[in-house]
């Protein structure tokens, strides 16, 4: 099965990293011990995050309360967007250079970076009318002088997740008069008759995040002209490598980089290429040692 070998490798890697740099102590549950979990004490101190660029400060601004899954589980991806993207807030030019390599030199300025962002639903703008959010959200100025958004979903060892029977999400994605069908049709980026495939476990999360980006383009058409949806994952995560390739094949075309996949390795390489100083080099070295198996 895809990802089983990688997950075991990543688990071993995170345990070794924790014991080398953080602590040999780990969280003890009532029925088991999990070595890749930080203790609650270390999680509350922000040990799951990069120690610099105000990363943990921004975590607590976004999430004031401790959450063990996010703050102590070293193997899950919930904490990773903060480590990958918060440092760019300190140097938007550096961010621009890195993302121009990904996007094809269409960015003039990076205007704003938000982590764990969901657009506010109002009576005027309902987007997908659910709780879908972006791991990272970047507003930028395009070379055509219009505004655009880059949205990012980050994965580490995860694969797809099963749809919960009777859930709001199940009802939403099967409602042919609802937002999912409307945006899929309205945005015009999908080939005909692919929606049943998009709804499957393999593609559903990629589709939902992409639709949220496209819904912003539809609802806020006076503000934004471009929207891009990216998935970041380690190259050994074969699940998202395959799913991303198959998903792209369902798009009419991708000339405006509507969708893309970026491996952690490729991202780190681009960061090294444009690294502005030793402070950022230390951060890049951290990403390499922390996440690359």
Image: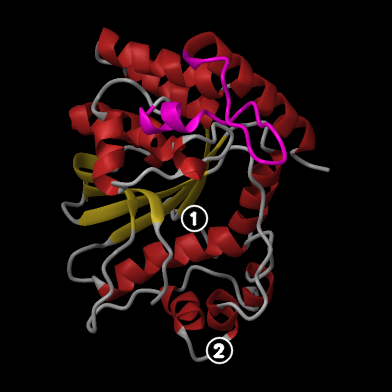
Pinpoint residue 37: horizontal percent, then vertical percent.
Answer: 57, 31
Q: Secondary structure at mark 2?
A: loop
Pinpoint residue 27: horizontal percent, then vertical percent.
Answer: 58, 31
Q: Which mark is residue 176?
A: 2
Pinpoint residue 140: horizontal percent, then vertical percent.
Answer: 22, 47
Q: Is residue 73 visible?
A: yes
- Indicate the quadrant containing the C terminus: top left, top right, bottom left or bottom right: top right
Q: Main secondary structure of the magenta part?
A: loop
Q: Is residue 114 visible?
A: no
Pinpoint residue 89: horizontal percent, then vertical percent.
Answer: 22, 34
Q: Which mark is residue 240?
A: none
Residue indicated by mark 1: 254
Q: Is residue 266 left or right of residue 86?
A: right
Residue closest to the far right: 1
Of marks 1 and 2, the one in the foreground? 2
Residue at horizontal 32 percent and vertical 73 percent from the top: 218
Q: Looking at the picture, does residue 190 appear above or below residue 273?
A: below
Few, some or many residues within 10 Å of mark 1 (<14, 14–19, 20+): few
- Indicate the quadrant containing the N terminus: top left, top right, bottom left or bottom right: top right
Q: Is residue 232 left or right of residue 121?
A: right
Image: magenta residue range: 22-46
Few, some or many residues within 10 Å of mark 2 (<14, 14–19, 20+): few
Q: Secondary structure at mark 1?
A: loop
**C-alpha span from label 1 to label 2:** 26 Å
> Between residues 3 and 95, which one lies in front from this camera angle?
3
Residue at horizontal 41 percent and vertical 37 percent from the top: 102
């Amino acid at each position: 099965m895809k990802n089983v070998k990688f997950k075991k490798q990543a688990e071993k890697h995170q345990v070794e990293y924790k014991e080398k740099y953080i602590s040999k102590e780990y969280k003890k549950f009532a029925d088991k011990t999990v070595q890749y979990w930080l203790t609650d004490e270390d999680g509350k101190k922000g040990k799951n995050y990069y120690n610099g660029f105000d990363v943990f400060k921004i975590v607590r601004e976004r999430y004031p309360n401790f959450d063990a899954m996010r703050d102590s589980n070293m193997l899950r991806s919930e904490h990773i967007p903060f480590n990958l993207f918060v440092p760019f807030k300190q140097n938007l030019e550096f961010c621009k250079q890195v993302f121009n390599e990904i996007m094809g030199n269409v960015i003039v300025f990076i205007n704003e970076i938000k982590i764990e962002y969901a657009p506010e639903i109002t009576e005027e703008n309902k987007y997908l009318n659910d709780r879908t959010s972006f791991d990272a959200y970047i507003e930028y100025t395009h070379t055509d002088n219009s505004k655009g958004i880059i949205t990012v979903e980050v994965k580490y060892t995860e694969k797809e997740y099963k749809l919960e029977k009777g859930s709001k999400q199940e009802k939403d994605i099967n409602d042919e008069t609802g937002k999912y069908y409307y945006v899929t049709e309205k945005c015009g980026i999908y080939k005909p008759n692919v929606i049943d495939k998009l709804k499957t476990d393999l593609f559903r999360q990629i589709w939902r995040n992409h639709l949220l980006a496209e819904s912003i383009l539809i609802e806020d058409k006076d503000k934004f002209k471009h929207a891009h949806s990216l998935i970041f994952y380690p190259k050994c995560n074969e699940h998202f490598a395959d799913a991303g390739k198959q998903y792209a094949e369902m798009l009419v075309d991708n000339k405006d980089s509507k969708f893309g996949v970026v491996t952690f390795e490729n991202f780190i390489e681009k960061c090294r290429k444009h690294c502005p100083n030793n402070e950022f080099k230390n951060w890049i070295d951290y990403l390499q040692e922390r996440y690359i198996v």
